[in-house]
């Protein structure tokens, strides 16, 4: 048995705007210099990627990418200094939450093991 934690930031209507997918998209934009290429590399539609970034920007009230139009390739995006700092901050936050969950999860596992042994001792049946 293992523990998997998904962490999202939500708006006032409880709609997700930041999670691991947006984080990966921002990191990929930083690597490729292109929202289109980043979305393609993550196997999501460009329009979905664009929407994810726009939603995060609207909720944070800050631009995350600088969109470049025109030129020969007609594409290009770069991360804002805010986005670079936000990525690091969010990664650290996510890791801290996961690290802190290990202790209560260990206590849960111990209690579950005890409960299962007690159930076995009392003639409980397994599924």
Image (cartoon, rainbow, N blue to C red):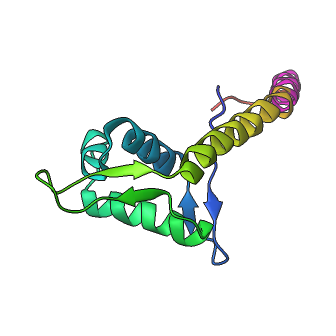
- Image: 46 above or below 7: below
In which quadrant is the C terminus drawn?
A: top right
Residue found at x 40% / y 58%: 66
Q: Quadrant of residue 68?
A: bottom left
View extreme (left): residue? 72
Residue for point 55% across, 49% down = 81
- Counting from the top left corner in percent of width and height, residue 35 is at 31, 51
Q: Is residue 97 left or right of residue 15?
A: right
Residue 88: where, in percent of width, then height?
A: 63, 39
Q: Quadrant of residue 111?
A: top right
Q: Percent x, y for residue 114?
A: 88, 24
Q: Is residue 115 located in the magenta-colored stretch of the structure?
A: yes
Q: What residue appears at the point 29 percent right and 51 percent down from the top-left corner?
A: 44
Q: Foreground: 17 or 70?
A: 70
Number of numbered labels in the structure image: 0
Q: Is 27 in front, or is 124?
A: 27
Location of residue 62 in the rendering, given as x and y in whole percent from the top left corner: 57, 66
Res 24 seen here: yes
Task: Report if residue 6 is visible in the image.
Answer: no
**Residue closest to the eye, 95 or 4:** 95
Measured along the vertical axis of the image, is residue 40 above or below residue 123? below
The N terminus lies in quadrant: top right
Q: Report the predominant secondary structure element of the magenta stretch.
A: helix
Taking the magenta stretch, the answer to whether it contains residue 7 is no
- Position of residue 41 relative to residue 121, above or below, is below
Residue ID at (77%, 30%): 99
Magenta region, residue range: 107-122
Outermost residue on the bottom side: it is: 13
- Horizontal side of 42 relative to 4 (left or right) equals left
């Amino acid at each position: 048995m293992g523990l998997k934690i998904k962490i999202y930031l939500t708006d006032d209507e409880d709609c997700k705007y930041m999670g691991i997918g947006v984080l990966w998209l921002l990191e990929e934009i930083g690597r490729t210099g292109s929202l289109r290429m980043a979305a393609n590399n993550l196997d999501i539609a460009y329009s979905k990627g664009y929407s994810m970034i726009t939603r995060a920007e609207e909720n944070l009230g800050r631009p995350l990418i600088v969109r470049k139009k025109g030129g020969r390739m007609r594409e290009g995006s770069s991360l804002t200094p805010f986005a670079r700092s936000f990525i690091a901050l969010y990664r650290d936050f996510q890791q801290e939450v996961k690290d802190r969950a290990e202790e209560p999860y260990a206590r849960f596992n111990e209690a579950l093991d005890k409960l299962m042994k007690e159930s076995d001792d009392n003639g409980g049946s397994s599924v």
